[in-house]
Image (cartoon, rainbow, N blue to C red):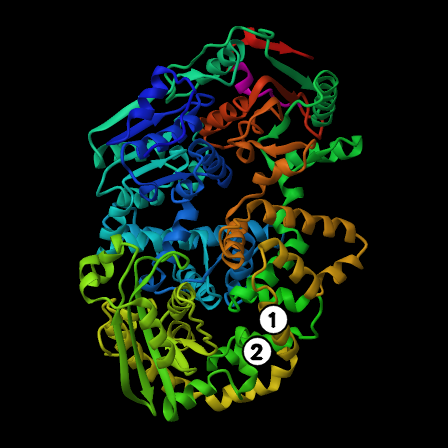
Amino acid sequence: MNLAYCDMKFNQQQQKIIDSIFGAFLVSAPVGTGKTTVLTERVVMAMEEGIRPEEILCLTFTNRAAEEMTERIKKRINKKNVADKIMISTFHGFCAFFARAEAKRLGISSDFVIFDEAEQFEVMKKVLEEFPQVIIDEQKSKREIINIIEEVYKRNLSRLEKNIGCLVPEIKQDKVMDKIGEKYLEELKMQNALDFNNLVLITMEGLYRDKKLQKKWSKRFRFIQLDEFQDTHLSEYLVVKELAKKHKNISLIGDLDQTIYSFRGSEPFLIADLFRAHFKPVTELHLEINYRFNRHLLDAIKSFLDNLERRATKNINTEKEKEGEKKCINVFGGYNLREEIEWVISEIENIKNSDKNAGIAVLARANYIITSIAEVFNQKGIAHITVDKYDFFRRQEIRDIFAYLKILFNKFDMGSAYRIIQRPSRNISDAVLKNIREDGVRTGLRISDFLDFKNFNFKEPFENLIRNHEKGRVVVLDTETTGTNVLKDEIIQIYAIEVVDGKLGKDFHFYLKNTIPVGISGEVHGITDEFLEKEGRNPRVVLQELQNFISGNVIVGHNVNFDLSMIIENGKRHKINFDLKEYYDTLDISRRLVESENYKLSTLAKKFNLATATHDARDDVLATVGLLGVLVEKLKENQRERMEIFFSVSKKFIKLASEISMWNKGIVNKRPAEILKYIWEKSGLQKYYSEKEDGDKRLKSIDMLMRLFEQKDDLSRPGDIVLRELINYAALVRDINFLGIDRGKIPIVTVHQVKGLEFDYVFVVGMNEFKFPVFKGDLEEEKRLFYVALTRARKKIFLSYSRFDDYGRNITKSSFISGINQNYIKFDN
C-alpha cells in the first residue's frame, strides 16, 4: 500500500520497533520517548507489509490517547477512507463494539445503551431498597454503593475466570451479595443497558465459551498493539490474548514504572509473564532516549527511580543539552497547607509574568487537598478548573438533554424516562411510576410501553400481537449478513414465514448475491462467497419480493431491530422503501416474562423444547415461531390486568408519547448538533433553564456540548448513527479529557487524573508523610505515583509540604523529597 511519505528521522531503537511487525513484542516505552509517534508509524509499516487496515487493532487506556492516535494516523496516511477502517479504541470501547456486533449470538439487544458510573449508582441504589439488611452509611453512601457494584463485578468475573480454566482463589460465599448481583443485572437488562463491567464480562464470555465466535474473532485482526499495558487488568489481557491467538502478531507497549492502578486490579508483571508464556518467543525492545526533559530535569527524575524496588527503566538518556538551571526542582516548607497554597499562587504569578502562555498544573495525592487548594484559588480570584467541579457530563442540564436523546433510541432506559418526566414537569407523579414498576412489571408492562405512541391505538401494548397471532397474519423473519455494519454490509440470506390464524403458512427463503466478501462472518453462518455466486439471487428482486411478502403485516423476530435495520438500509441501496411500522421482539418479551440464565435464542429454544436454533436463518425463524407461541400464551394470562393498568395511567403519558413520536420524525436527516438544538428547544428544556437564576451558565453548557457534537460529527455517515455513537462516547469518556476546553484555567487535579498529560510547570502540594505517600498505602505504588507526578513537567517542578497540620501538630516532610538527588533541589523556605 502506497502511503504518505514520512520525512521524520527516527533513532535506532525507534526504527527497530517500527520495523518489528510480525511476531510478539514486549516494548518498554518510558515517558517522553516518542512512543505515540512510533506506534503510529508501526501501523503505517504494517499496511506497507500487506496487512489491510481493517485487520489492525490499536487499544489504549484512555479516550484521549485513542483520539490522539486516530488524529495522528489520519494525518500520517492522509486517506480518510483507509484510516477509518483501522480500529483504534479504548478497551471498553472495543468491548462495546464486540457486543453490538455479536448481539444476536450473545442474546442481548444490539441497540443497548452504556450506563456510566452515575447511572450504575442510581440502579444499584434502587436495588438496595429491596435489601434492608444492607446498611449504608448516609455520609459514605456513594462510595459504599460503588464498592458494592465493584464487589458484584469481582464475584461474577471470578466465576467466569474459573469456568474458562483460570486458577483463581475460591469466592467467599455471600448469598445476599449474590442476590444483589442478580437483581442488579436484571435491572440493567430491563433497561436494555450494559455497564462497563458487563461489557468486559460479555466479551470474555463470547470469546471463551462460544467456539464459533472464538474462531471468527481470532482470525479478524492480523496486527494488534496494546498501549499502556501496565494499566491492564487480567480480564482485559485475556480478551486480547484470544483475539491474537491465530496470527500472533501482537505487541504490548508500556512503562511498568508508571503502574498506578493496582487497586483496580492491574497486574502488569503477571501479564508480562503470561504474555511471554502464551506467545513465545517474545522479543523485548526498549525506547531509551527522552525528548521531553532537559538533561538536568531528566537526571533529577532518574535519581528518584533508584528508590523503586523493582525498577523497570534500566536506561534512559536525552540528547538535549544541560539547558536551564541545574536546580530544577523547587521545594517549599510552609507553616500549614494554607501557606503552601499561597506560595504556589505566588510562584504561578512569577511564571505568568515571564511566560503568559505557560502550561501549568497543580497536583495533589488526595481529593480533600484538591478541595482546599480550589477554595484558596477562588478567594484569590485565580482562574482554575477541577475535574469534580467541571464534571461536564454530570451537570444536570447535560444529563437532562442526554436523557431526551437516549429515549429517542432506547425507550427501555428507565433512568432517562424518569428525568424527562421531571424536567420540565409532566404532572406524572412518583406514585404512578411506582404503580407501573411494581404492578405493571408482573404483567409484562414497562414504562417504555407508555412512551411508544403506537401503543395508544390499543387497549394494551400486546393486544394487536395476540389478535394477529390468533386470528390474523404475523410474519416472522431472520437474516444472515456479511457483517454487522448496517451502512456497509449486505444481506446474504433471508428467511421469513407467515403465521396465519396461529398456524404456519407460506415461507419466503432466498440467498442473495453479494458484492462484499463474506469474510470471517462465514465462521458463524457457514455461507461462502462461492455458494452465493452459484445460488444467490439478485438482491433488488429479492428485497422487492420481501416487501410484497411482508405487505404491512406485524413483524416478529428475535433481536429483530438488527434485521430490520439491515433490511431498511439494503432496501435504500436499491431504491426500495420499507415502512416497517409494527414489529415485536421476542428477545424483549422473553426478558419480561421468562426467567432464564440468558436470552439467546438457542437457550430459550432448549428451555421450551422448540426447534433448534443454529444461526441458519431458516432454523432460527422456526425456533422463533415456536417461542412466539409460548410467549403469546404467557401474554394472554395477564392480559386483563395489563389492560386495567394501561387504561388507568395511559392518559398521563399520551401527550409525552405523542411528543416523542413527533421528535423522532423531526430529527430525520438532521446532523447531531442540529438534533441537539431541536430537542433542546422542543422538549421545553431551553425554556425551563432560561427561567432559572443560573440560566446563562446552563445555556453555556449546552453551547459547549453543541460545539463538541459539531467537532466530532462525521458528515460521510447518517446523523442518527453518529448521534448514537456520541451518546455512547459520553458514557465512556472521563471528564479529565475535557480540561482543555476551558483554556487559560489552571487544572487542580489528582495525580491519577492527570496521567498522560504534560505541562511546562507542575506543582505538587501536600508532600507530607501520610499525605503523599498516603497512610497504609502500597509504598511501591505510591513511589510510582510520585514518579508519574514528576514526569508531567517539561521545564520545572515545584513541591511543597507543611510543617504543622490544621491542629498545630508537627508533621513530617515526605520521604519522597529525600529520595531525589539533593543537587537538583532548591529549598525556598
In magenta, the rendered stretch is 810-818
Res 177 seen here: yes
Say if 254 sits above or below 689 in the image.
above
Q: Amino acid at mark 2?
A: Phe
Q: Tell me what residue is drawn at x 30 percent, y 25 percent.
A: 19
In the depicted view, which residue is nearer to us: 400 or 565?
565
In the depicted view, which residue is nearer to us: 175 or 479?
479
Say whether residue 669 is left or right of residue 378: left
Say if 347 sits above or below 579 in the image.
above
Residues marked 1 and 2 touching at CB (< 8 Å): yes
**Residue 453: which numbered mark, if any?**
2
Quadrant containing the C terminus is: top right
Say whether residue 592 is left or right of residue 341: left
**Residue 91: which numbered mark, if any?**
none
Q: Tell me what residue is drawn at x 35 percent, y 51 percent.
A: 157
Q: Position of residue 453 (x, y in %)?
A: 57, 78
Quarter of the view holding residue 630: bottom left
Say whether residue 663 is left or right of residue 575: right
Q: Is residue 552 magenta?
A: no
Per the image, label 2 sits on a secondary structure element best described as helix
Q: Is residue 811 magenta?
A: yes
In the depicted view, which residue is nearer to us: 134 or 526?
526
**Residue at numbered disc 1:** 660
Q: Amino acid at mark 1?
A: Ile
Q: Position of residue 216 (x, y in %)?
A: 25, 52
Lower sequence index among marks 1 and 2: 2
Quadrant containing the N terminus is: top left
